Image: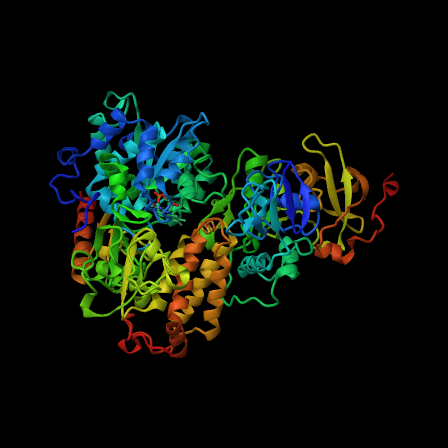
Amino acid sequence: MTEVQKIEFSPEAMLEVSRIVSHYPQDKMKSALLPVLHIAQNEFGGWLSAETMDYVARLLHIHPIEVYEVATFYSMYNTKPVGKILIEVCQTGPCCLNGAEKIVSYIEKKLNIKVGETTKDNMFTLKTVECLGACGYAPMFQIGETFYEHLTEEKVDMILENLKQEKLKAINN
Amino acid sequence: MPKVTIDDITIDVPAGTTILEAARMIGENVPPAMCYYSKLKGSGGKCRVCLVKVTKGSEKDPRPMPKLVASCRTAVMDGMEVKNVTSPEVIEARKGVVEFLLVNHPLDCPVCDQAGECHLQDLSYEHGAAKSRYEFKRRTFETRDIGDKIKLHMNRCILCYRCTQVADQLTDQRVHGVLGRGEVSEISTYIETAIDNEFSGNMIDVCPVGALTDKTFRFKSRVWFTKPVYAHRNCTKCTGKVTLWYQGEEVLRVTSRKDQWGESEAFICNECRYDKKATSDWKIEGPAHVDRHSVISQNHYELPFELPVTQKKLQ
Amino acid sequence: MGRKLLLEHLNKANINTMEGYLQNGGYRSVEKALKKMTPDEVTEEVKKSGLRGRGGAGFATGMKWSFLDRNSGKPRYLLCNADESEPGTFKDRLLMEKIPHLLIEGMIVSSYALGCRTSYIYIRGEYMFILRILEKAIAEAYAKGYLGENILGSGYSLDLHVHPGAGAYICGEETALIESLEGKRGNPRIKPPFPAIAGLWGCPTIVNNVESIAAVVPIINDGGDEYAKIGIGKSTGTKLISASGNINKPGVYEIEMGISVEEFIYSDEYCGGIKNNLELKACVPGGSSVPILPNHLLLKMSDGNPRLMTYESLSEGGFATGSMLGSGGFIVYDEKACIVRNTWNFARFYHHESCGQCSPCREGTGWMERVLHNIEYGHGKMEDIDLLWDIQRKIEGNTICPLGDAAAWPVAAAIRHFRHEFEYHVKYPNRVFDEDHVYQPEMKMQKV
Ligand SMILES: Cc1cc2nc3c(=O)[nH]c(=O)nc-3n(C[C@H](O)[C@H](O)[C@H](O)COP(=O)(O)O)c2cc1C
Ligand code: SF4
Ligand code: FES
């Protein structure tokens, strides 16, 4: 299943890119870099390969190094491949006061991976992140754009199982 | 013209002059600078070794500044009073900064090409403690070639950003930059890209430490065993005014000429730097004047020495 | 019940939609400001209100607006700081998620006061779901004529866009935010020049926190004087506090400035007391950057009077015995919480978030984290405690931006007030934790 993906935005993504670019003065296209990289990451498998970054550089008329500099600075951009479902658990102080560390160990045991690793079936990657602005609803993790809060072990089981089924269904269709 | 007093010496300087430049005009007790480079726009402010204390803001607003300021990026105001070496607070902070700079800096001076002309080495002689209190593993990177002429020892880099500014300001396509964030940021091209343009070699000259070195430096030699000589040639791309570094009768490397603050007087092109390594390529002017308080000058160079090659011999 | 100016309509039906918002009196301040007031009059009301920036530094908003260079001939920009990444802070999120139109309304009135043609909301990338909520609300506002050309026939035109970050706490610092909006790494700029003179794309720029901008709405609706009646001294109006940690009712509360800290922690209207009937041990009252205070200093000021939730009262005594209101990220620790572990955790945060430009912060934050890690995991030495003190002291005040200070203060305060816990960790390396990192009860407030 290693088909080579052609690096080119879908027409919908392209439309979104032009909408974003229109938010900035014409000679300040570079300002669109962060939002466009988000789109690129969504479009091309959840991470930014050098080819993807070069494509974005061409699109915005900037040097590739300007994209690399930015992509490696911000923690939301993955410069290495990740699993289909990226679990980002908040591990900052306030969450830890309410059991974040236990949730991390629980997921590690459950998926049989350590933080930073991906399961063999390439389904889950577990990552710890810093404060996500959910301290009052701890413990929590983010998957995609969704915040899952007030986590318990049972809730974690349910959420991960549901997401996995969804992904499998999408792949089979 | 604003009047500024630094360590009790008063001088009139043009408006907009920074404290550091004013101190250089006075010429005594000049704050050190690792990241500031007068010829590079936007440089400075990062390393923090040039911190000074402003005890009086200006005639108009005499309040002292609440924090130490980076002298390289703070413009003088009329009536400003500044303390550099006369402030124990400044000395203490500077010592701290030097310690921070050394936290991740390898102790490989014995094998480093820059030894003898390294600003960090000079600085740690003046401000360093005998022993580092840092007990952890230093961050390490692989040594890499960026292009066929430049070697990058990222371990030694202090992230002054000067080399990226050279690339931005002297060339029209920068291919290397600062990648990553915080303690693990690094100078890199990200993907294998050779740095290749007419003026790229100046990155080597602006590097204050031994992170970027000249791969064509033909023989491994300690800087203080080589003899610097001023020379020039007619060059269409740059001024052609350089320093030749001799060992015996052989030119080991070519660099720009450094002023007393260790800055290039004029940037030179790659042809002069890499391709002209025969004495016959050059008109020799005389021994280079090295007057930084550096390890080199402490060794030999204030003494006059015989030119390794005289013009006569060439003819 | 305290008065609510921002969250008054939080639980009204459809308050997140234009319709629901209008039904509850929304966009009145736009009508009033654009049709009946000059931009300077709007600024004047904000000055009168005494509103101080809610992003952390507490700088007077009206005063900041008056610094904006209005004669440069360049466009002027208002940037809303919705980066909200300070650990313990999650108030802006609630405002934007539940009442997005309040922020948009505030942006319109504030942009009018500052003479901006285009304004941006810079939101942290992790809040992408809120970006979508805001964009939907902005589209509604365009449709109703509150944004775009010639708003409500007033002759004033404004475009408003939302710009996502991508995971970097430092982008909350205003010049890093500007760099990031320009599509660059979030490296703070060296000041001067200040943004009010040369900010976004070199143009005069004002950066304000979400809550500050939202507060402009009630200020214009009811008048600055009315707003200033709430609160004590230079702490006027209401403040959103995000409460978290070991309390019964974590969440976001709008308080009138000036209620006592004790009331905030123990009253059922707010935090509802400490969870599991444990004792209060300590509190970080204003987001992870501000000094932690042990319970006795938290509840009372040095003169023995109760400490109040105001800028002045929380900082009374300086760092020796006081702290700061900061961003209002109120983190509460019960008697079982381990201060050393928490300090290590915060140190790791700053280490992770340092942009790496200046040497004290780049090298010092990592060093502190490693030393703290050693102490926490039983490999510490007594000298390490003094070493930590020395490192933080050499970072503080010597960096480009305040992140260096923010990294230093929590370490300093923890050693200042809880040195005995550090010493205990060094002395009894094996006794500190069970395997779940739960603090051993026998350690409770034990002095060595
Ligand atoms: C490291 C750092 C992070 C910051 N993060 C935020 C933030 O997330 N949100 C915010 O509003 N202000 C933040 N600030 C404060 C801003 O720099 C700025 O003071 C504020 O946005 C001004 O708005 P205000 O005057 O309305 O408070 C941060 C400052 C620093 C130094
Ligand atoms: S203090 Fe830290 S975050 Fe701020 S500029 Fe320096 S390195 Fe960057
Ligand atoms: S020389 Fe001024 S901060 Fe580096």
Asked which quadrant contains residue C158, the reply is top left
- Asked if residue B196 shows in the view, the reply is yes
Q: Residue at x 15, y 42 (%)?
A: C9
Foreground pick, B86 / B119: B86
> What colouring method underlies this structural image?
rainbow
Number of labels in the image equals 0
Left or right: residue A115 compared with residue A28:
left
Expressed as whole percent of the image width and height from the top left, the position of residue C321 reads 38, 63
Looking at the figure, which quarter contains the C terminus of chain A?
top left
Expressed as whole percent of the image width and height from the top left, the position of residue B28 reads 70, 50
Foreground pick, C49 / C140: C49
Left or right: residue B38 compared with residue C101:
right
Expressed as whole percent of the image width and height from the top left, the position of residue C30 reads 24, 30
Foreground pick, C383 / A145: C383
- Asked if residue A125 shows in the view, the reply is no
Left or right: residue C272 compared with residue B143:
left
- Against B15, residue A155 (above or below) is below
Expressed as whole percent of the image width and height from the top left, the position of residue B296 reads 73, 55
Q: Residue at x 64, y 57 (%)?
A: B121
Q: Residue at x 26, y 59 (%)?
A: C261
- Against C317, residue C162 (above or below) is above
